[in-house]
Amino acid sequence: MTATEPRPDLDPRWADMNSVDRIMEVQEISDAERDEVIHVVEDNSDAIFTWNYEKGERARLNKLYEKAKTSQWNGETDLDWSIEVDPTQILTIEDPNENAWFRENPDSPLYKMNDEEYSRIAVEGVNWRLSQFMHGEQGALLCTAKIVETVPWIDAKYYAATQVVDEARHVEVFAKYLDTKLDGEYPINPHLKMLLDDIINDSRWDITYLGMQIMVEGLALAAFGFMHGLTEEPLLKKLLRYVMSDEARHVAFGVLSLQEVYESLSHNEIRERQEFAFEAALRMRDRFLQQEVWERLDVPVRPMVEHLLNQPDDQKEFQRLLFSKIVPNCKKLGLLDAGDGWLRDRFTDIGVIQFEDWADTSEEFLEFDAVNQDAEAAAKAAATN
Ligand SMILES: [Fe+2]
Ligand SMILES: [Fe+2]
């Protein structure tokens, strides 16, 4: 079975998960939507007060809140914006297998593309990815403002308030990088937009957490890490390291909060969460087909999407790595094996189940602590001078 054939044994809602028609349909957004500056989403949640002000009732959330207070940074002054950036040199490492699949394969729309054209794809790819990071960060800003309102625990409200500031800073630094260092920002990808709309639209407060903190931010943490490893551009490298240091706390916040909630849900309620998580995973996978880049470069979009979907599994390292945080975090929440292990089967279908035993982010956020690590290193350097 090729990747683009539907699975006959799956619920009809998921059977066409690899259908090119479905993916292309989502991509067809109206011109009006393309030009909009303000986008309105209905938010169906209640705003919740709590009169229980007992700080530290949830000790691990309280610890995270204290950590957030001492890990703040300033996007204007902690990054060196005087660094000059050559967009063609941001991502220079090429994977020879991928090269062969795209440039030496007669079925590929990029067959025999010359070096200059291929380099343009890399440049547009960076513009596109950083643009989607920026839009996703705004999604996180709105979602965490919503969590402040909807979560019933004071420790979680406190923590979420620090995350609102973090997310504002992330939108700010990605927007500034795109504006001052690159040329040609992209609008939000329709798959990502649909997912963010669904998360904000949902009335259940734990779904904001599951959609944003676990799925979108889990993927973002892996994607930032991937790009951080591939670039030697010093400004972007530091920007990503600092953003990741915050994101690791954010995902930990999701895991610690939801663990408690999911222990008490019924079988049917858990199944709804499993399906929500899988649908979110598919939308995030589909957004990485970057149709907007092919459109801009006049590469035929549909054949390109088909070629990408049919790429051999052993080459899809980038897409798979993106799930390296999501799968262990879903496992930690009990979502992988709850019921009949429905989510385990679906993650197996899309080839990402092998990440289940990787570190979950409730434990590893301390390793990402860039602000305090840099402060300690600076203090050590000052002491030896
Ligand atoms: Fe963020
Ligand atoms: Fe975040």
Image (cartoon, helix red, strand yellow):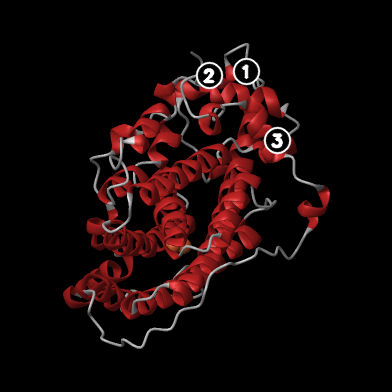
Does the closest atom of ligand 1 sit within 8 Å of the Cβ of label 2? no
* Pointer 3 or 1: first along the chain: 3
Q: Please name the residue shown 26% across and 50% down the image.
A: 332
Query: For the residues marked 3 and 1, what is the alpha-carbon distance in whole angstroms?
Result: 22 Å
- Would you say 270 lies left or right of 117 here? left
**Ligand 2 image position (quadrant):** bottom left
Q: Please name the residue shown 53% across and 20% down the image.
A: 310
Residue at the farthest top position: 106
Q: Please name the residue shown 34% across and 80% down the image.
A: 154
Q: Nearer the viewer, residue 372 or 254?
A: 254
- Would you say 115 lies left or right of 221 here? right
- The amino acid type, in three-letter code, at marker 3 is Glu
Residue on which the image places disc 1 = 108
Residue on which the image places disc 3 = 25
Q: Secondary structure at mark 2?
A: helix
Tell me if residue 378 comes above or below residue 225 in the rendering.
Answer: below
